[in-house]
Amino acid sequence: MSSRSTPRVGPLASRTHGAPHFDVDAMLADPDVGIIVCCGSGGVGKTTTAASVGLRAAEQGRHVVVLTIDPARRLAQSMGLTELDNTPRPVHGVDDRNGGSLDAMMLDMKRTFDDVVVAHASPDKARQILSNPFYQAVSSSFAGTQEYMAMEKLGQLHAEAGGGRGHGAWDLIVVDTPPSRSALDFLDAPERLASLLDGRFIRLMLAPARGPARLFSAGLGIVTGALSKVLGAQMLRDAQTFIAALDTLFGGFRARAEKTYRLLQAEETAFVVVAAPAADALREAAYFVERLTEDHMPLAGLVVNRVTQTHAAGLEQTTAAAAAQRLHEAGEHPVTAHLLQLHADRMAAIANEEHLRRRFTAAHPRVPVVEVPALATDVHDLDGLRAVGAALGAAGPPAESA
Amino acid sequence: MADNGKASGGGRVRLHVVSGKGGTGKSTAAAALALALASGGNKVLLCEVEGRQGVAQMFDVAPLPYEERKVAVAPDGGDVYALAIDPEAALLEYLDMYYRLGRAGKALERFWVIDFATTIAPGLRDVLLTGKVFEAVRRRPKGDRAKGSAARAYDAVVLDAPPTGRITRFLNVNAEMAGLARVGPIRNQAESIMTLLRSPRTAVHLVTVLEEMPVQETQDAIEELTRAELRVGSVIVNLVRRTGLSDEALDRAESGALPDKGLRDGLVDAGIKPTEPLVQALQQTAREHAQRVQLEASQRALVEKLDRPVVELPLVPDGIDLGALYELAQELKEQGLA
């Protein structure tokens, strides 16, 4: 378990329904935090959050690299990422008065995989692997590879950053997790590799390639027979050749993935769960929180994006709706009537969102929460990222007059 | 073979694949489409593949096992069945159906083959998920043995598919498989699936909202799908807000130039005390609303340029429940998607 002290409770704790306030700036200012991982379901603003956190940290003086997995095009452009070349590039336009810097990169899973092959296999073997049709399908077209490669890349960046001791180019790595079925497929990657390598399956696949060994029991014969029947002899043979060729790489792969997994459990890592104030997104968020706790991953807090705001909290929904109705029926003041109805709709949305967040906090009372107000337009430049960062940082959302 | 479907429906779409950026409401749209297709006496299967049990929550039924269950009755007769496809169960079923492996099947399980195929190996999950959908689309009604019969167990199948970022890779996985297996049963199966997915009997509908990133993703997805020879059906614009303000009022609202006096008088007539902060709050609300309407108008223009049929679903302010699903289904029907 983490021994980090519980985050400070902000002055506006009441706004977050009894949950402690998630002090993002304190997290960014903590030199012991070297990795921030943003996770959450798709479409909740995860990549935007990662980019905003990275920019804010850089402008506060840290040397940051942001690893994004699959950013929307305009968001990528906002950070100057016009091509996917798998290498961190400096982001221009960052305020460096505090001595910080920001680099950003997009993960190219095929390239990352190729690099691993080239770096860890003999030139002959590497050529053989890279031209194998199975390898080409697995490395470029198949879902699931991204998780393994994100893990690999994070490990590489961490090593380049000087092992988190700040001796390298960066002292903070911000990671945006892959848009998987479950973002935590990312966490499962090392265990899956391990269970693959420890499993009888791999021995089964390797046995014929290594020649008839004593492993070749009757049970094995039945299985190979069945596989051959299902896959066809050619495909089984190709698969075996592919796995035999990769065999030498697997060990190293797994060792690095496990190292990265332990790194994620370490004190220097902070997980940020991102959600929108909607039932399904908060349900996913609750699932992440539970899973992170189970795996002893240090959870820093929950970011709730796109929270509906009002400018007149004192005017209740029912009053506004009734007033709008009255004007509407009288056929007078159509503009005022419409604005009152808009206000009533917003108040209804706010009530619904508050209900959902209260439900989350009731189940997870110790998870610090910070809210980011809904913006009228999309975020697609550094100023937009700065605005989100400002909402995330410092004192949290503005206090409301009752 | 697969082409028999034409005889019954004259190229009618049998498989509706619904995708969209996360957060745009693709599952809601898929459920509403299933209801719309079922109405008037059809039997429709709604499949989910991401293990979230979203269908059960929307239709307010207990979590779905790996079994087709009736979840709703459509207007004017017709049934919606639902299935949460589990890759492991699908694999075991597939092996049983086509190979009758018996003892050898058990041996596969012992040797972690099943585990490997369903969780560890990249890509194979998608093969299994699309394979099961394929089976459901082509399934004959019980007891129908007539050779060449075009009757099918379901009139239509709706797939609540992975999000736009992954949809092409997901649907195209069998083309990759066909490339890997040069001969044999896997190749035949993979080719049959791709034939169905690329035929006029399959349409991929893309759900979006009127914001920059989702519209951009929709455009990217159309390009990718087209390149992979997959057919894009309609663009479903979800969460559409309708404004009651005139263009003139919107222009003024945007520059904060609605007359304060008008607002004050309106509030008085409505029985609300017109304090200065309240008037300014309404001005601010109006400005944000006008910005939003303008953003949506510019995005709508982009959606129209995509050159696909467009259907719109209204924003349901207080969340989606079963009643709202029926209303959305009605909208889809009226706009000709079902």
Image (cartoon, rainbow, N blue to C red):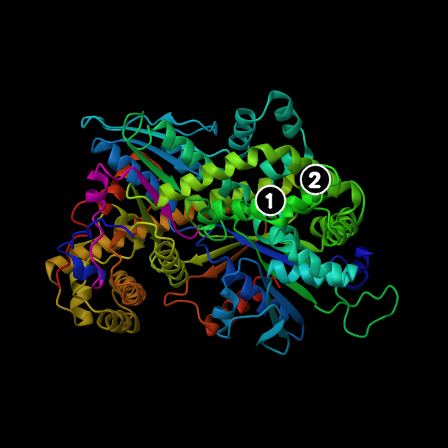
Q: Quadrant of residue B106?
A: bottom right
Q: Residue at x 28, y 31 (%)?
A: A165
**Looking at the image, residue A384 lies above or below residue A271:** above
* Cα separation between marks 1 and 2: 24 Å
Of the residues shown, which amino acid type is indicated by label 1? Answer: Arg
Amino acid at the residue labelled 2: Gln
Instruction: Identify the residue at image location x=70%, y=68%.
Output: B154
Q: Is residue B270 above or below residue B189?
A: below
The x, y position of residue B211, in whole percent, is 41, 48
Relative depth, front residue between A258 and A128: A258
The magenta-colored residue range is A17-42
Left or right: residue B280 versus residue B75 is left
Does dot 1 land on a helix, a strand or a loop? helix
Letter of the chain that mark 1 sits on in the rendering: B
Q: Quadrant of residue A261?
A: top left
- Residue A316's place in the image compared with B14, above or below, is below
